Image: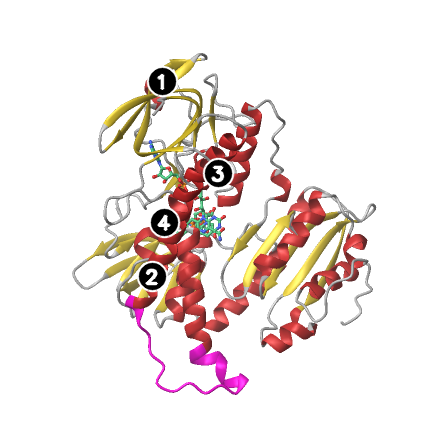
Amino acid sequence: MSKNFDVVVIGGGPGGYIAAIRAAQLGFNTACIDEWKNEKGGPAPGGTCTNVGCIPSKALLQSSEHYEHASHGFAEHGIEVKGLGLNLDKMLGRKNTVVKQNNDGILYLFKKNKVTFFHGRGSFVKGDANGYDIKVAGAAEETITAKHVIVATGSNARALPGVPFDEQLILSNTGALAITEVPKKLGVIGAGVIGLEMGSVWRRLGAEVTVLEALPAFLGAVDEQIAKEAQKLLAKQGLNVSLGVKIGEIKAGKKGVTVEYTDSKGDAQKGEFDKLIVSIGRTPNTIGLNAEGIGLKLDERGFIAVDGDCKTNLPNVWAVGDVVRGPMLAHKAEEEGVAVAERIAGQHGHVNFNTIPWVIYTSPEIAWVGKTEQQLKAEGVQYKAGTFPFLANGRARALGDTSGMVKFLADAKTDEILGVHIVGPMASELIAEAVVAMEFRASAEDIARICHAHPSLSEATKEAALAVDKRALNF
Ligand code: FAD
Ligand code: NAI
């Protein structure tokens, strides 16, 4: 096997494995190094996303939603369920199977595209514009060479100072996805994406969940109207979220975890929990890369410093995904991976940061692309808004899921769509239309004039676009 490659990718998460496949498609002799191990010590490419992120969380969100429907939702459809039970072992087992299918899928894709896969840790030994020596420390140790290196080493969960994760009582996302008995009382610190998704999973399965959030506003980055609606809906389901808290001492004992905190009124509070999830953001992972040794520049927050094209300070060394600036999202990592491979090939790879969609997979889902109303106000942009509630959508009524709305924001003069925000059923799928529209710089009227299938949730998107011009038809 040749050990001299045109492109070596360090990290096999969505940023890395996609970059490797695209580089191979473009004709480069490509290798991808990933160190993630499955429970048997074997390779498990796919990174955080596949192993302890997007995929397992969505598997559990789906299973727990089925359970909740069976417990509370089926009755109104005239379906009577007797003797309903929860087999958590089986649910977790299914989640692990879904993860493994994805790991195996990536190994298959490497073979199909002739990407050489190395299982182990990659680190820089030496190099310059002519090429780099990369040490691979796996079952054996070897050194390979690369003309171009793409670093895609991802991120790790951030711990609270002095409160390390033990994954038994104090859980990061890894432990939160593998609790073997539904806790009676579950504490969550941080009402961000992980806090709300994992909080929803365990609440649906029967835990009493308390989410403690430092900021005074719920989902501050989300359009305020949508965030308020989501907060109301999640509270109605029984997810207790306390905003504006200040976390004090956290003690893990034999029986559980005690969290002392000050509430938004300044009163001292104490929470007693069986388990505590800490989801307060993630930090870039550059451990073991020998970044310092090779002179790879990090920024002040520890991310690999890159320019708009994902170029680092070292010639022919690129970095993509969670380890560089920008949103920590799998699809952002993938887009950067593709763009870098194309740039190496002399093409004009491009990532449009204005049209990266966000989805929070709560129920109902929250999804958005582009600017929020508060951002447009702050930027002094003149805009028009149109909203349409799912309550007035026939398909939503038939589904029995009429919560939430679609909201369009368009330029007051040109009618160009500036942002689309959804809280409601299948928002994760509906947002794709808005992304396409914004990518093609469509106007709200363009969407309003397009024929949407009836009855479908997407009619709510069309109606919200019509509402921008105050001419919604069904509301
Ligand atoms: P990673 O996926 O972190 O992959 C990096 C890989 O590099 C890992 O396999 C790691 O082992 C390996 N590695 C690191 N250093 C080395 C080295 N020196 N040598 C060899 N290998 C190395 N995003 C979404 O878009 N949608 C979601 O629904 C979503 N859900 C999430 C749920 C949770 C619970 C979490 C934690 C995250 C979620 N994310 C989601 C975020 C998403 O997982 C990340 O944005 C994405 O995984 C980043 O991809 P990456 O390739 O940059 O890094
Ligand atoms: P996050 O940034 O989404 O949320 C962290 C929350 O914790 C914030 O609201 C923050 O104000 C709060 N916080 C920070 N310090 C705190 C403290 N000391 N006390 C109380 N609250 C505190 O981060 P999270 O949820 O850990 O997720 C990490 C990233 O993973 C996300 O930003 C996202 O990029 C990605 N992700 C994406 C998902 C998706 O796309 N559906 C799902 C899950 C994660």
Pointer 4 residue Cβ closer than 8 Å to ligand 1: yes
Alpha carbon separation for disc pair 2 and 1: 42 Å
Which of the 4 image quadrants contains residue 186? bottom left
Name the mark nearer the viewer: 2 or 3. 3
Which segment is the magenta one?
Answer: 70-89
Q: Which residue is mark 3?
A: 18
Nearer the N terminus, badge 1 or badge 4? 4
Amino acid beneath label 4? Asn
Q: Which residue is mark 4?
A: 51
Amino acid beneath label 3? Ile
Nearer the N terminus, badge 3 or badge 1? 3
Q: Secondary structure at mark 2?
A: strand
Q: Which residue is mark 1?
A: 294
Q: Which residue is mark 2?
A: 187
Alpha carbon separation for disc pair 4 and 2: 23 Å
Quadrant (top left, top right, bottom left, bottom right) of the C terminus: bottom right
